[in-house]
Amino acid sequence: MNDEQLLRYSRHILLPQIGIEGQDAIVAARVLVVGAGGLGSPAAMYLAAAGVGTLVLADGDTVDLTNLQRQILHSQEGVGRLKVESGRDTLARLNPEVRVLPIGRRLEDGELEAEIAAADVVLDCSDNFATRHAINRACVVHRKPLVSGAAVRFDGQVSVFDLRADDSPCYHCLFPEGEDVEEVRCAVMGVFAPITGIVGAVQAAEALKLLVGCGETLTGRLLLLDALAMDWRTIRLGRDPACAVCASR
Ligand SMILES: [Zn+2]
């Protein structure tokens, strides 16, 4: 790190759990954020401010007026632009040291595989089960740590699936695909603005801890927030030995 970086990141470096070595790991890291909406906004902003060297931002949507109530990566002048381009500009203003790679389409198949294989940590900030399961499958194959977040109405949840570890459950262990789960999307449901901020910020915190290797992540735990009661709960998660995705890994 140069002198300016030492100053910029001094408050991280002062933390004994991070220090120069931890900040070096953050600066050297490549992180994939899938979704530049309500969760991806605060997640990408904290990761950029914290100095993640390469931030890959993937989202095929454009900024809509109804997004601005919670998607703080975007502003009024961004309406109609690709979210990843609006996001890249915001992140560049926040920290010009960070290389932001915008992918303005839905990541699928080979491209999704390649991006996950290249990432040190993956953040699922998407809003639909098809994408969540595709990300999970690729993270299982490539044994990449996955930080998964969701928020709708006043409810949020976060977990980490550290698929480098043999005993970590995967997303599919928790939410098996094809089960009759109600798909509630922020695009059509109400969502309390700060809940996306809280969940996205927790995702950024978990991603940074994974990069640095400090503390204890949410691996094997699901954190649930009811913002109406402002009540946090944690549920223990185990691996499903019959999981169709990770059982044979
Ligand atoms: Zn599994």
Image (cartoon, rainbow, N blue to C red):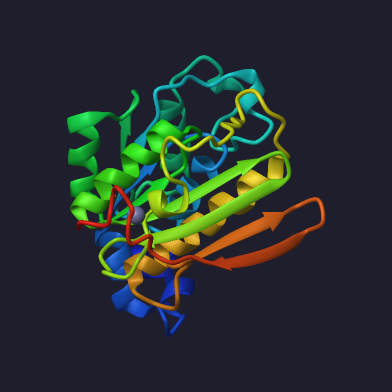
Indicate left or right for 138 with 228 as reference. Answer: left
- Quadrant of residue 27 in the image? bottom left
> Quarter holding the N terminus?
bottom left
Please tell me which residue is depicted at 27% across the width and 29% down the height of the picture: 108
Count of all numbered marks drawn on residues in the image: 0
Q: Residue furthest front?
A: 242
Residue nearest the viewer, comparing 192 with 173: 173
In the image, residue 40 sits, relative to residue 130, either above or below, namely below
Indicate left or right for 241 with 216 as reference. Answer: left
Please tell me which residue is depicted at 45% across the width and 80% down the height of the picture: 14
Please tell me which residue is depicted at 22% across the width and 30% down the height of the picture: 109
Residue 194: image x %, image y %?
Answer: 70, 46
Residue 17: image x %, image y %?
Answer: 42, 82
Tell me if I can see residue 71 in this picture: yes
Residue nearest the viewer, comparing 56 with 34: 34
Please tell me which residue is depicted at 35% across the width and 64% down the height of the picture: 5
In the image, residue 35 sits, relative to residue 136, either above or below, namely above
Q: Residue furthest right?
A: 229
Residue 42: image x %, image y %?
Answer: 54, 47
Q: Which residue lies furthest to the bottom in this view?
A: 16
Residue nearest the viewer, comparing 163 with 217: 163
Indicate left or right for 210 with 232 as reference. Answer: left
Residue 187: image x %, image y %?
Answer: 60, 25
Tell me if I can see residue 56 in this picture: no
> Quarter holding the C terminus?
bottom left
Q: Dividing the image into four equal quarters, which quarter contains ligand 1?
A: bottom left
